Image (cartoon, helix red, strand yellow):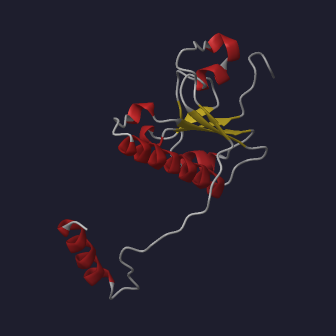
Amino acid sequence: MKPHDQFAKNYLEELLSPLGQVEISKEITDENRQIDLFFSPHPDRQITVDNLGLLGQIALNSTLLEPYRNSPTRADVRNCLAKLTAVFAELQRQAKRENSPYNEENLPRLWILAPLVSETILNGFGAALDPNWPEGVYFLPPLQRTAIINRIRPRGAI
């Protein structure tokens, strides 16, 4: 452990211990998670948006797709974000093992597909519309690399 880390932990422990229980270097065990669908485009194959519309736009880059039949809850969205974070960590470990560069710009994007997502959830996760995407496609802040597709209707549908 680096001296600064040890100092910071000890210092924070001293400050917080009168207020409650403090555990330093607490081990966490995580459950095995499954991504509903992980897509990586063929590097030599040209995908055009015209082929698949919105799905074609999504498929231009590596993607995690998490479809929901019903409205996702806050916990559902958090669990999806945890899966994405686990993928990021795995890609970072792989790059380190292979002694190759870890390019943040090439990280996959998470797409949560739902028939309806409440305004409370969209606002709570900081999701916002992007004028370059169809209505109903909400993006979380950029570093989260996540979008929620909410109530997409085909063009001309009522």
Residue 124 seen from this side: no
Q: Residue at x 54, y 46 (%)?
A: 84
Q: Residue at x 36, y 37 (%)?
A: 102
Name the quarter where the C terminus is drawn: top right
Q: Residue at x 39, y 36 (%)?
A: 104
**What is the number of callouts on the image?**
0
Question: Which residue occupies the foreground of this view, 125 or 81?
Answer: 81
Name the quarter where the N terminus is drawn: bottom left
Question: Residue 110 appears at what percent x and percent y?
Answer: 57, 39
Question: Residue 15 appears at what percent x and percent y?
Answer: 27, 81
Residue 121 vertical placement versus 37 (above, below) = below
Question: Which residue occupies the foreground of this view, 73 or 4?
Answer: 4
Quadrant assignment, res 147: top right
Question: Which residue occupies the foreground of this view, 142 or 29?
Answer: 29
Residue 157 seen from this side: yes
Question: Which residue occupies the foreground of this view, 111 or 131?
Answer: 111
Question: Residue 157 appears at what percent x and percent y?
Answer: 80, 20
Left or right, 93 with respect to 31, comes to left
Residue 7 vertical placement versus 102 (above, below) = below
Left or right, 46 with respect to 114, comes to left
Left or right, 12 with respect to 143, comes to left
Residue 33 vertical placement versus 9 (above, below) = above
Question: Residue 65 appears at what percent x and percent y?
Answer: 65, 37
Q: Residue at x 53, y 21 (%)?
A: 132
